[in-house]
Amino acid sequence: GESVGLHLPTLSVQEGDNSIINCAYSNSASDYFIWYKQESGKGPQFIIDIRSNMDKRQGQRVTVLLNKTVKHLSLQIAATQPGDSAVYFCAENRMNSGYSTLTFGKGTMLLVSP
Amino acid sequence: DTAVSQTPKYLVTQMGNDKSIKCEQNLGHDTMYWYKQDSKKFLKIMFSYNNKELIINETVPNRFSPKSPDKAHLNLHINSLELGDSAVYFCASSRGGLSEAFFGQGTRLTVV
């Protein structure tokens, strides 16, 4: 079946390091991807998105890379801070009969030590 | 102002009871969703509504019935609650099309 993401791993980094969170997707028809951050006790919060006609997009301290050849998505966080500690989800958004569906990967927990 | 708000934030109830979770969005979005997040943090879509019409109904027991009185509200009613219904339920909304969804803060449902 179709799937997005990996089993929930944990990435532990030191404050100031750069973090890279990876995500694999299997549906080549997906045309829009989103990274979400979920802090404890809160709902997922949009970080950055990318359309399938792009391979890189940069935000503030974050960069998303899309490799359609191998169906891989990554989120890079520069100069990681303790406030970045959260669970990060990739999600793929597909149009189906004119309506979009948002399918989430399984998430990665990022732990940032001061 | 909270963009997507859902109530209650916590809900503890006994097996067999019926309960409702309410959701409202003030973003003017046409599309609203209910997601279920299990203990392993996996987020699975349950329902999607567009302009009060049901668009997506994933494999969800009939005990779950969403209701959209207007496009700013999507409530979730659950009948005959079971232990396995314990989870965090998230409401979300979007403009539709290729756009991000905005999530509420979640309702942690515990069935005892």
Image (tube, rainbow, N blue to C red):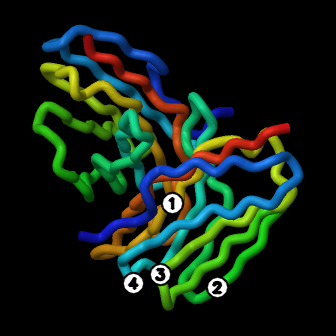
Nearer to the camera, B31 or B35: B35
Of badges 1 and 2, the one in the foreground is 2
Q: Is residue B20 left or right of residue A58?
A: left
Give the residue type that dot 1 points to. Arg
* Alpha carbon distance from label 3 to label 1: 26 Å
Please say if B26 is above or below A4.
above
Q: Secondary structure at mark 3?
A: loop
Residue B30 position, x and y percent, is 44, 55
Residue A36 position, x and y percent, is 59, 54
Q: Which residue is mark 4?
A: A28
Please say if A79 is above or below B17.
below
* Of the image marks 4 and 3, the number of the one nearer the N terminus: 4
Give the residue type that dot 3 points to. Lys
Q: Which residue is mark 2?
A: A55
State if disc 3 and disc 4 touch (CB < 8 Å): yes
Image mark 4: chain: A
At horizontal 68% and vertical 33% (from top left) the residue drawn is B1
Q: Is residue B25 left or right of residue B40?
A: right
* Alpha carbon distance from label 4 to label 1: 23 Å
Give the residue type that dot 4 points to. Ser
Image mark 3: chain: A
Of badges 4 and 3, the one in the foreground is 3
Of badges 3 and 1, the one in the foreground is 3
User: Label 4: few (<14), some or many (≥20) within 10 Å?
Assistant: few
Nearer to the camera, B37 or B35: B37
Of badges 3 and 2, the one in the foreground is 3
Image mark 2: chain: A
Nearer to the camera, B56 or B71: B56
Q: Which residue is mark 1?
A: B95
